[in-house]
């Protein structure tokens, strides 16, 4: 990844058996478009759950929610 390229997130769709890396600014729209086009609006595609959990933990720690 160059300095000009935004970071990406892995988007998976277990129903299709696909995984794709999507620039962060495009994740929500990409997931919505895929689910509408391929699955009739059913929420199948998502950010890889392991990555989403790790990101949530990092944000919670950064915001002080995990401080004891």
Image: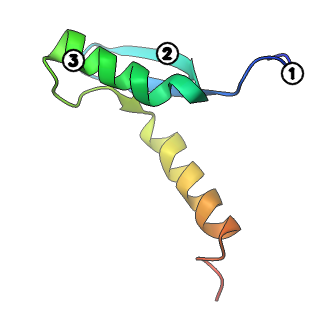
Direction from residue 41 to residue 25 in the image, left or right: right
Q: Is residue 31 left or right of residue 25?
A: left
Q: What residue is rendered at 25% in x and 20% in y?
A: 35
Q: Position of residue 57 (x, y in %)?
A: 58, 60
Label 2 residue SS: strand
> Residue 37 occupies which quadrant of the picture?
top left
Q: Residue at x 32, y 26 (%)?
A: 45
Q: Secondary structure at mark 1?
A: loop
Pointer 1 residue: 3
> SS class of the residue under badge 3?
helix
Compared across the picture, whether 8 is left or right of 12 comes to right
Q: Is residue 42 above or below residue 51?
A: above
Residue nearest the observer in this picture, 30 or 68: 30
Q: Which mark is residue 36?
A: 3
Q: Is residue 57 visible?
A: yes
Q: Which residue is mark 2?
A: 20
Alpha-carbon distance for marks 1 and 2? 20 Å
Counting residues from the start of the chain, the first of labels 2 and 3 encountered is 2
């Amino acid at each position: 990844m160059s300095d000009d390229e935004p970071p990406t997130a892995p988007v998976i769709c277990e129903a299709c058996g696909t995984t794709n890396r999507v620039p962060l600014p495009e994740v929500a729209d990409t997931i919505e478009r895929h689910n509408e086009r391929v699955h009739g609006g059913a929420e199948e595609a998502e950010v890889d759950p392991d990555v989403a959990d790790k990101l949530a933990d990092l944000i919670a720690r950064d915001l002080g929610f995990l401080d004891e």
